[in-house]
Image (cartoon, rainbow, N blue to C red):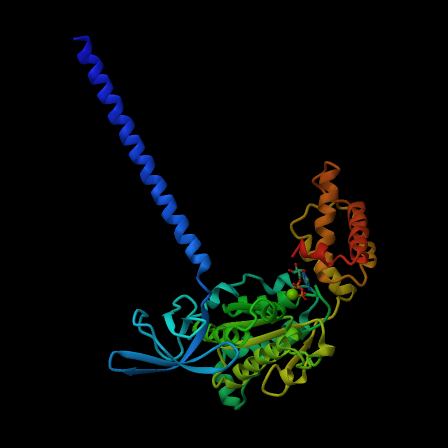
Amino acid sequence: MRNDIDKAVFSYTTSSVNSELEEENRILKETVEQLRNEVESYRAPALLVAEVAEVVTNGKKRQATIKVPNGNQFFVNVSSEASPISAGDTVLVEQKNLTVIDRVKSTKKFAVEQFVILEKPTVHWSDVGGLDEQAEELREVIELPLKKPELFKKVGITPPKGILLYGPPGTGKTLLAKAVAASTNSTFIEIVGSELVQKFIGEGAKLVKEIFQLAREKAPSIVFIDEIDALASKRIDMGTSGEREVQRTFMQLLAEIDGFKNLGNVKIIGCTNRRDILDEAIIRPGRLDRLIEVPNPTIDGLREIFKIHTRTMRLTKRLNIDLILRRMEGYSGAEVKAVCTEAGYFAIRAGRTTVREKDFLKAIEKVKRAEAHGGRDYLKMFG
Ligand SMILES: Nc1ncnc2c1ncn2[C@@H]1O[C@H](COP(=O)(O)OP(=O)(O)O)[C@@H](O)[C@H]1O
Ligand SMILES: [Mg+2]
């Protein structure tokens, strides 16, 4: 009897140990297999990326003319395992004999919407202070043609395709562009010149093309090109391949602007702090030929901007606004906004919810000091 029990326990434990060992063995085998595959992938030489110029099918045999990145063309074989390819496709090729291994699917179309800021702004004209003339001109060039196209037909003129806003940073150029997009219920497509040339090396021209395609799809729309001087600069002398690339992107931009037949529903607003280095080609008649200067505000402008940014603040009744404005002479709109935010912080630190004159005076000093330390970054915090 005793013996029987022992036997049963023994066989139970051995079978459970067995299956545990089997399981472990299986896991180890899988791990070895994975590691082997990985080592294999390290050994395999990298594949080149090329573009297909032409495909030739000869019975079952496929061959193609491909273009490698340095521009040279080759006539090569296509692996029988490759999926169907056609001219214009991006493909992976072996380094040695340039046999086409397969088509690259993901890069076929540039997902332009990932790279631009696309929005329907809600900025109202009343959010813009001290720029009445500039606002008026924007409305004439952008709002009027969109709202009353028949008027232009009757008079027999075509409205400008685009505008160039220029002036020091933080004066409300982006704000104006957003306000006109909002008032016309347009899609606002924002690209930044310096990003276009730095981030999208080799793709700038393609991206520009697709941005304008997107703009037409989403019309009415405004293509807003910030820091346009990064693309359209007369300082570029084409010495390096990077500069040639910038030039190509710029040429594509000009081609897009010139190529528009019916521009009614897509407008372009360029923006720069460096009017002095701008390539004149971009502002030639028929291109961004309305130049609008957006300078730092006058005292009256400061007053309006101050009013806008203190609209929602609780201010003490005893506030010498004239004194505050005088101390802010030479400040940009963005700096006035920063002063208001900082003044609010001084009140909070003092345990108050009402903002006093001394809070503003301290804030003015703080913003000025930040500025003296080269602190445009400080302003970026406040957008
Ligand atoms: N004229 C202005 N009126 C009201 N706010 C302004 C004005 N100019 C600048 N600002 C404030 O500063 C912020 C940054 O201004 P922005 O339009 O981006 O300047 P820019 O494009 O000229 O560099 C705006 O979002 C706004 O809050
Ligand atoms: Mg801006």
The answer, for residue 128, to whether it is visible in the render is yes
Q: Residue at x 36, y 40 (%)?
A: 28
Side (left or right) of 335 relative to 70: right
The answer, for residue 119, to whether it is visible in the render is no
Q: Position of residue 101 (x, y in %)?
A: 37, 70
Q: Nearer the viewer, residue 353 or 98?
A: 98
Seen in the picture, residue 11 relative to 292 is either above or below; the reply is: above
Q: Residue at x 31, y 32 (%)?
A: 21
Seen in the picture, residue 372 relative to 288 is either above or below; the reply is: above
Q: Residue at x 65, y 68 (%)?
A: 173
Side (left or right) of 259 relative to 328: left
Q: Position of residue 380 (x, y in %)?
A: 68, 57
Q: Nearer the viewer, residue 224 or 52?
A: 52
Side (left or right) of 228 relative to 148: right
Q: Nearer the viewer, residue 232 or 239?
A: 239
Q: Position of residue 238 (x, y in %)?
A: 66, 81
